[in-house]
Image (cartoon, helix red, strand yellow):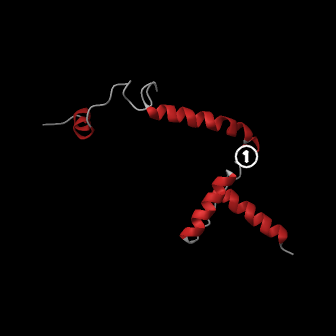
Amino acid sequence: MQRTKTTSARNRKGAAPAADEAPGGDGAESGAPATRAKRAARKAPEAAARGAKAEKATIKRTKPLNFRVTADFRKSFKQAAAAEDVKKVELLERIFADWQSRRP
């Protein structure tokens, strides 16, 4: 007997939920869409404030820089980047630029 894709998919994953029951539906009964809406509302002012960042985002980073650090350093570095609201690579670039400017 030959199975169709629809039958085998249902057997493995179950029936598809109705449109109003699916995650991301109308948002009235599910907490997840409300969370997405809150995130979007929170990001809207930040996006406007990031006008300079949008221009800076055009920097092409094509070469990897891989090295190992301790778990404590990684955690501290990640927290510092989050506190400054920048990517870790941007924080590293800032720190390196500052270090270069201080060198004789």
**Residue 67 occupies quadrant:** bottom right
Q: In this view of the protein, which residue sits in the foreground, 7 or 72? A: 72
Q: Is residue 87 left or right of residue 23?
A: right
Q: Where 25 falls versus 66 (above or below)?
A: above
Q: Residue at x 38, y 24 (%)?
A: 20
In x, y percent, where is residue 92? Answer: 69, 62
Q: Where 40 falls versus 80 (above or below)?
A: above
Q: Residue at x 41, y 32 (%)?
A: 23
Q: Where 77 falls versus 103 (above or below)?
A: above
Residue 64 visible here: no
Q: In this view of the protein, which residue sits in the foreground, 30 or 58? A: 30
Residue 99 visible here: yes
From the image, which quarter does the N terminus lie in?
A: top left
Q: Residue at x 19, y 36 (%)?
A: 3
Residue that sits furthest to the left in the current view = 1
Number of marks present in the image shown: 1
Local packing at callout 1 (Cα closer than 10 Å; few below 14, some 14-19, many 20+) is few
In x, y percent, where is residue 79? Answer: 62, 58
Q: Is residue 13 left or right of residue 73?
A: left
Say which element carries label 1.
helix
**Residue 41 occupies quadrant:** top right
Residue that sits furthest to the bottom in the current view = 104
Q: Residue at x 72, y 42 (%)?
A: 50
In x, y percent, where is residue 70? Answer: 56, 72
Dot 1 corresponds to which residue? Answer: 53
**Residue 51 occupies quadrant:** top right
Q: Is residue 73 left or right of residue 92?
A: left
In x, y percent, where is residue 2? Answer: 16, 36
Amino acid of disc 1: Lys
From the image, which quarter does the C terminus lie in?
A: bottom right
Residue that sits furthest to the right in the current view = 104
Q: In this view of the protein, which residue sits in the foreground, 103 or 55? A: 103
